[in-house]
Amino acid sequence: MAAELNNTNTDEAPTVGSNDSMSGGPQYLPGVMSTTLRPTSPSNGSSSSSFLGTSPTSTSQVVPTSGASTQPLNPSAAAASSALQNDLEEIFNSPPTAQTASTFGGDSPPQRQAGSLAPGPPLGSSGVSIGEPSSTIAGALQAGGAGAAGGNQSGVQFQCPRRPNHGIEGRSILLRANHFAVRIPGGTIQHYQVDVSPDKCPRRVNREIISCLISSFSKYFTNIRPVYDGKRNMYTREPLPIGRERMDFDVTLPGDSAVERQFSVSLKWVGQVSLSTLEDAMEGRVRQVPFEAVQAMDVILRHLPSLKYTPVGRSFFSPPVISASGVPGTAPPPQAAPSISSGSHSAGQYHAESKLGGGREVWFGFHQSVRPSQWKMMLNIDVSATAFYRSMPVIEFIAEVLELPVQALAERRALSDAQRVKFTKEIRGLKIEITHCGQMRRKYRVCNVTRRPAQTQTFPLQLETGQTIECTVAKYFYDKYRLQLKYPHLPCLQVGQEQKHTYLPPEVCNIVPGQRCIKKLTDVQTSTMIKATARSAPEREREISNLVRKAEFSADPFAHEFGITINPAMTEVKGRVLSAPKLLYGGRTRATALPNQGVWDMRGKQFHTGIDVRVWAIACFAQQQHVKENDLRMFTNQLQRISNDAGMPIIGNPCFCKYAVGVEQVEPMFKYLKQNYSGIQLVVVVLPGKTPVYAEVKRVGDTVLGIATQCVQAKNAIRTTPQTLSNLCLKMNVKLGGVNSILLPNVRPRIFNEPVIFFGCDITHPPAGDSRKPSIAAVVGSMDAHPSRYAATVRVQQHRQEIISDLTYMVRELLVQFYRNTRFKPARIVVYRDGVSEGQFFNVLQYELRAIREACMMLERGYQPGITFIAVQKRHHTRLFAVEKKDQVGKAYNIPPGTTVDVGITHPTEFDFYLCSHAGIQGTSRPSHYHVLWDDNNLTADELQQLTYQMCHTYVRCTRSVSIPAPAYYAHLVAFRARYHLVDREHDSGEGSQPSGTSEDTTLSNMARAVQVHPDANNVMYFA
């Protein structure tokens, strides 16, 4: 269909179809969208250039998070930066009003007329320098990122806003949550600092040391049961008879082969922890929840499980057991729990296969954490599962990793380089124990795998005469132990320190049990894991209840010591099911869709703004015998039929349809298409499965040439279904600049009455164990009033850095794009920040809120849009279960989409809520947790909950509501896509070394350039 602007319809979007198609935007009016475009700049035109920025935007800068600015400011820039710093100080330090602690300037945000701009002088009149942030600001931001302990140079203090009220919208629903009420006594407990020397022992060893200390020096612990966190904190109910001075103890632990280990332990009284203050916080009498008291409660309740199980983070695990039938199985949490009190498992009830392949297996366990909530402390308990390495001979481990039978390893054939690299990646860092020295099972950590096999790998051997000779590993083991190696053709394990050249043949080594797998699971392993752990909601509820019942917390001697009791019944809470928003489509019918249980049907409807596809191509990287020409012809015909029905007509046959093989053909082919077919809009790429070609297609399309690409699996091109083709059209339309659907304007919250921009922010980190690859930060921003279109900006930054270091320039970039597309400055900013744990709230708020405010003031002096900053959390263990069967939905009997809870299990005073916005397909639905860290816009609970739920319906890839708001989801997609842009720039040789002659800064700089997308791609949602 022709993408024309229909001026007679107040809900129509601006014209779409070219790279500057988003240059116009509707005026913001209460409850209605107008297509009258009114630029906001004065008639002299000076403001536009000022707000859009006359100085170049930094696109590849990696901002340090500590240290002073390295570039001196010139006098004029220094003066401007000083003015900017003063403005920020005035904004953030203004005393709060009685209504909210987070209001800027000491007053509520000024009342603006609908469609008007933020107050302030004409754009461009301030004279504030636009460019590098001042050293003063940078220092303040860096200080803010250091956390409370490090101090704050600027003196600015941030505090999460109070809950404005409880929501009332939506129908009522009765729920049970896996939170268990904890009764705490009044009074105080004693806190001691523990220092163990040597100081680099793991928590497990430290616990052994403290247990030995208590038994060896029992006179100091008469009638006292201390609890210990495995590091530096010990708590007792009554004071120890050591006074307040430091006391030192010498502790001896028995070690392997009767070798005793000596440790020095010091205890020093830190202070008293008030439990009464904690009660006051739960009941809302004091604002701040005392962290020290919550930490002490957590240590008390985790002490006994830490002695019984393998702790991983806040969860505890036990190894798989053999079922009663003799079949290897797993012991899920209900079976593991009795060992807390009875020390035994009830095997035979579960027969699920625990093996994941690749030497990995599933361990089941349980999560446990103490959480403050309204009126009482809660103990959050949930079933949990994670991957561990199987305890097995290393020879069998090699066979599993390489997907070979063990017999194949005995064929005296050396490993190929690819096999050796794959094995090295998997075993490096693991602990092994030797088997060739009888009862002496000494343990080592693997640091590498040799290139040469045991029969040729040599090392310097010192003879009794003092002479040093080169000896092979195979000969040494025969001479020393009379052990003829069965696998002399396999490489050796290098253990201990790399420079010491200690080599072990794999056949004399076993994998030490109890080692968690921190490396990324394969797709097959992930699928197996999901199938092994998926439980319907009623099943999960029963498992959790059984876990708590059999754990017998009332028999925990440590909890009893401190007077803590736990209610074994799940907490019942009242929730509400919010109404789903209507969605507006386009075409002649202008049809609307009302989601039913989180899903709606697009049949009979057309995209709100569809794009005509006139010049397009097909590149097939699957082999021709697998995907024949007739298959591609049928695929094309079906795709054209479905796309035409959807309002995105693909006109005519592809201008180019060729077969290709391998990564190296991608860039030449795409360059040929761009040079020879003017205005090419789209390349459909058929792939033979998981292949490196995908990453290269996205790198070339997104960053080099700016061509929209759509990848299709060969199996889906051969056997097409309407659903698959419809999903392809959803993605292709937005990649070309179209709009699939929008929220019906008259049902949106009042925040849409003024120009508002939605930001989604996320950081993705490389897999655990990979210390070389950078973290990637992504920010997306809405570019229209619906909001439906988004632009993205991405940066690489230091490995595992949790703060978005270049956020000032990223936000500035998106604000400028918003202004260019709509001719409005946002009067409101709503930020959905993903990937933030509760422990990072202060640091993120301290740095990132200031960065957003600084970006605004760099564009215009006095430009202060109201900011609402919300942390989005998916990685938590709160689960909600519908009490009444009539409220359970789907095959897994989950809570319905729209279920919201902001009472009972939420924070005592701060503004947070749980929202399950999606329909669970497999297993138990996990509600997302939203915690408001800042709110200038004074949103009510209902407004923010309704807004968040509506934003979960605007995700363009499917006709379903999703689990988090679309902008947060898009930020994740952008960061994930950037990983593909970096595939050939991460020097992933498998040897674990960085290329010689390259510094870390140079590598980051190269990567920063690699993730910058082509300008043509940046005008559309290339990441969809």
Image (tube, rainbow, N blue to C red):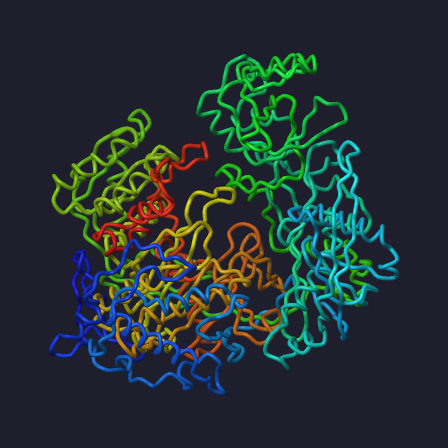
Task: Identify whether 519 is placed above or below 396.
Answer: below
The structure residue drawn at horizontal position 30% and vertical position 32%, both measured from the top left corner, is 663
Q: In the image shown, does 544 or 195 lie closer to the viewer?
A: 195
Give coordinates of residue 280: x percent, y percent.
67, 78
Could you say where residue 776 lies in the image, as x and y percent from the top left? 39, 51
Task: Give above or below for 175 relative to 465.
Answer: below
Residue 705, percent across and down?
A: 21, 45
Question: Does 653 appear above or below 216?
Answer: above
Find residue 346 and report its horizontal and vertical position in percent. Answer: 77, 43
The residue located at (80%, 48%) in the rendering is 212
Q: Is residue 723 visible?
A: no
Q: Locate the N terminus by quadrant.
A: bottom left
Report the front residue among 350 and 719.
350
Which quadrant would residue 950 be assigned to in this image?
Answer: bottom left
Which is more toward the observer, 291 or 208? 208
Front residue of 568/428: it is 428
Quarter residue 909 falls in: bottom right
